[in-house]
Image (cartoon, grey):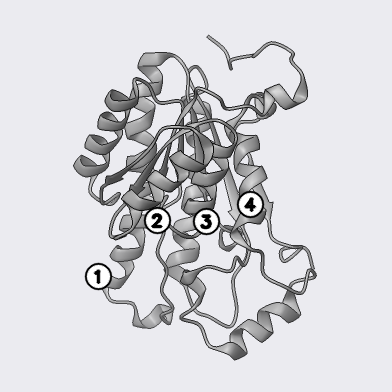
Amino acid sequence: MVLAQPPNQHVMKAFDLTGKVAAVTGGARGIGLEVSKALAEAGANVALIYNSSKTAETTAAEIASANNVRAAAYQANVGTQSEIEAAVQQISKDFGRLDIIVVNSGVTSCVAAEDYTPSQWSDIMKVNLDGAFYSAQAAARIFKEQGHGNVIFTASVSATLVNVPQKQAAYNASKAGVVQLAKCLSVEWVDFCRVNCISPGFIATEILDIHPQEWREKWFDMIPARRMAECYELKGAYVFCASDASSYMTGADLIIDGGYTLP
């Protein structure tokens, strides 16, 4: 086999996800929540995979009602291979198929490199890199059997540059690993699925709330756009990657950062 080629179709139809089934890790808040909404708005049935959210089931119900699609929430710790494997298998069983997985779960910390404890380093890698692989692997087993599928990783501009003034070597290394992982998997799995990354810059989410205001002011000075993005500004990119509109794109890393990586 070769990379699947859809028929030529009206461009709006190429973006249409009607009837598709998508799973989103970290899908109940932040970027993942907006991605879940976007996929549903494009017609997909959506499974929100969460770890600790207390509102995931309500959120899924709201997405289903607003978009006339099926949506449900599934609890799993992506850093535990058996948990994410079971959740993805259950999603495929409940929905009858799985077409798309958005591997989005992530955590961060700011620790000077010389001060990292083994557990602090491991905690980041377990979710951001190990969990990303386990999530993609679980979906790929289904995709291989089906003969088709689509993996979209949420990476970061931190895979490309070194953020300042915060010290976050573990986070940056984990996201660089995700980008290279996606490239490797896109080649290994080319016969049955596409694999791409989206690398956001500074996005206004809870993950940045821990940082002091003076850091934010420094970031704004470094971003040509002079502002952070809202999560919804990433929606189109994820729908593009999930749809036939990007049918010849695999192994790519889309950087969406208001120009942050350019100067």
CA gap between label 2 and label 4 equals 19 Å
Q: Residue 131: image x %, image y %?
A: 34, 49
Q: Alpha-carbon neighbours of circle 4 within 10 Å: few (<14), some, or many (≥20)? A: many
Indicate which disc, 1 or 3, sits on the residue closer to the N terminus. 3
244 versus 34 height, above or below: above
**Can the viewer see residue 25?**
no
Does residue 82 appear to the left or right of 2 in the view shown? left
The answer to whether the residue labelled 3 contacts the one labelled 2, judged by CB atoms less than 8 Å apart, is no
Mark 2 falls on what kind of element?
helix
What residue is at 41 percent from the left and 74 percent from the top?
109
Which quarter of the figure has residue 118?
A: bottom left
Mark 1 falls on what kind of element?
helix
Q: Mark 1 points at which residue?
A: 119
* Camera-nearest residue between 143 and 67: 67
What residue is at 47 percent from the left and 18 percent from the top?
148
Name the amino acid, label 4. Answer: Leu
The answer to whether the residue labelled 1 contacts the one labelled 3, judged by CB atoms less than 8 Å apart, is no
* Camera-nearest residue between 87 and 199: 87
Mark 4 falls on what kind of element?
helix
Q: Name the residue under label 3.
A: 31
**Can the viewer see residue 77?**
yes
The answer to whether the residue labelled 2 contacts the one labelled 1, judged by CB atoms less than 8 Å apart, is no
CA gap between label 3 and label 2 equals 15 Å
Q: Alpha-carbon neighbours of circle 2 within 10 Å: few (<14), some, or many (≥20)? A: many
* Camera-nearest residue between 245 and 167: 245
CA gap between label 1 and label 4 equals 32 Å
Q: Name the residue under label 2.
A: 128
